Image (cartoon, helix red, strand yellow):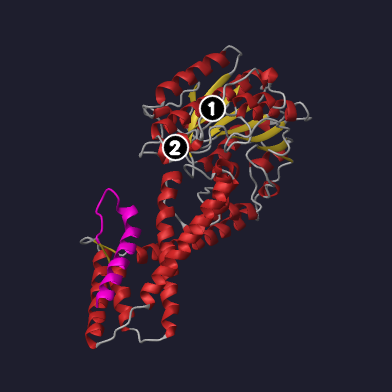
Amino acid sequence: MRRTVVVLLLLNLLFVAVAWPQAWGGRLPLFAAEALLLTGLFLLLPAGAWRAVPAYLIGVLYVVAALIAGFDILVRTSLGRALNLYLDFPLLRSAYDLSLTNLGVVATVLIALGGALAISGLTFMLGRLLAGLHARSGTARWAGSGLLALGLIAAGAADAGRGPVAAEGISTLHDQWRQAQQTRQEQREFARTLATEAARAEPTALPGLAGRDVYLVFVESYGMEAIVDPEYAPAIRSLLAAIEQQLDGTGMQALTGRLIAPIQGGQSWLAHGTLLSGEWLPNQVLYETMLDSSKPTLVTDFSATGHQTHAVMPANTRDWPVADQYGFDGIHDARTMGYAGPAMNFFTMPDQYTLSWLYHGLRQEAEGPLFAEVALISSHAPWVPVIPIVDWDQVDDGQLFHQHANSHPSPDEVFQDNAQVREYYLDSIEYSLQVVADYAERYLPEDALLIAIGDHEAPPIVTSTEVNRAVPVHLISQDEDLLDAWVHWLQADAFAQTLVDGFWPGTEQAPAAPGMDAFRQSLHRVYGDSD
């Protein structure tokens, strides 16, 4: 009986530990229904070596539930949403790449080995505990029956949210199974809708932009929080005002609006895909479904308009297969952009080099109008180092950036202090916005349109809890008629209704922002054949 009590207490501790992360700051459970259920069940099972099979299987399921609970906290902290194992399992590769970039090979391997050993040890321990339980007397069998009954009562109480009881292991696995079924159903419905649309859809030209360069520049982690959060707002508003004066001096004008991103904190490609396709893509499954559908996007629209289409993706260090599905004429990444400077934690090259190369390596070499999607990455986590903007004439192949590579603390040092994390985040956003402004002033053709847009809000670690996922959109051009074309649609187009002159996003008493999926349609209204 003493062994039974010890096992029951250990199981209770293990299963309560799964529930504690979710309950932190609220009602902390003290008892786990699973501990009662499993102890009672294994006391009632007949003796035999075969008992090890279900015991170790339950050990595996427990480890899965514990990992889900842990990763759920990580996903909520970094992406501002709950974990969906069906959707997020492929992100392990991205997490691995991020760890390699920021921590190095040795640390990444040690972390992986330590995790594997911990998982194996926990599975073995739980399996041994359960396999060793069996009733040696009638009293023990009665105890097993009682514990099983109590476990069922406790599970019901946990489901009703009553008392200090949890069944987080059961509910975690059940919730993930339910989410997987819902996601599969959403995918099937989305695929049917796209198949119907694709059967009659063709790329649509944008005659109002024919013969002009159009640059779609995504500024990493640039959300409305950077403009409205009291900690960031004074610096960012001052910078935007200075940028407006800077560009006014060159005859450039700007309109600023807002769009809602489908994600927060990461998975930038989902925001890119949403904007390009005009489809709401909040997860990887829908994103891949859209790509497989051959649906026309802004890439094919600009091809139909007569543009060469290019993707400038400096963060990519390997082939990007989806580029062919988008239909870009040219793909440019860290391997092909001629950068000879240092990699800086996550980002392979600073934004200033990326935009310098956009002009010298792409615009000057190309014939005819360009449509270029550009992903800036200097404001990507971990937001260090933030390097100074150098003389654009001296950028060349980027070797001069070596002098700044080690000018800031490491990510490990920065992330020990949340205030310091927020400080570097602000600095990195200021850097990226200023680089965009300098590029527009120096290199943007007179008749071109530059669309600078945040890809998503930053992770919750640097934002408030009231994030609505809105991002600023700046339309910049020296051609007054190009921007005035939006005025005709101010009452009819949801995105146009958010537009204000200059670089101020007009948050006070402004209409609700539409989703990023509305932007393709907005461009067609303003620059297409619509009247």
- CA separation, marks 2 and 1? 15 Å
Mark 1 residue element: loop
Q: Position of residue 484 (x, y in %)?
A: 56, 23
Q: Position of residue 47 (x, y in %)?
A: 37, 86
Q: Position of residue 206 (x, y in %)?
A: 66, 35
User: For the point 21% across and 85% down, which residue is it?
Assistant: 139
Left or right placement of residue 460 versus residue 453 in this view? left
Q: Which residue is mark 2?
A: 415
Q: Give the residue type at disc 2.
A: Phe
In the drawing, what numbered circle is on residue 14? none
Q: Position of residue 12 (x, y in %)?
A: 29, 65
Residue furthest to the front in view is 2
Q: Which residue is mark 1?
A: 386
Magenta part of the chain: 1-30
Left or right placement of residue 459 versus residue 219 in this view? left
Q: Quadrant of residue 226?
A: top left
Which image quadrant: the C terminus? top right
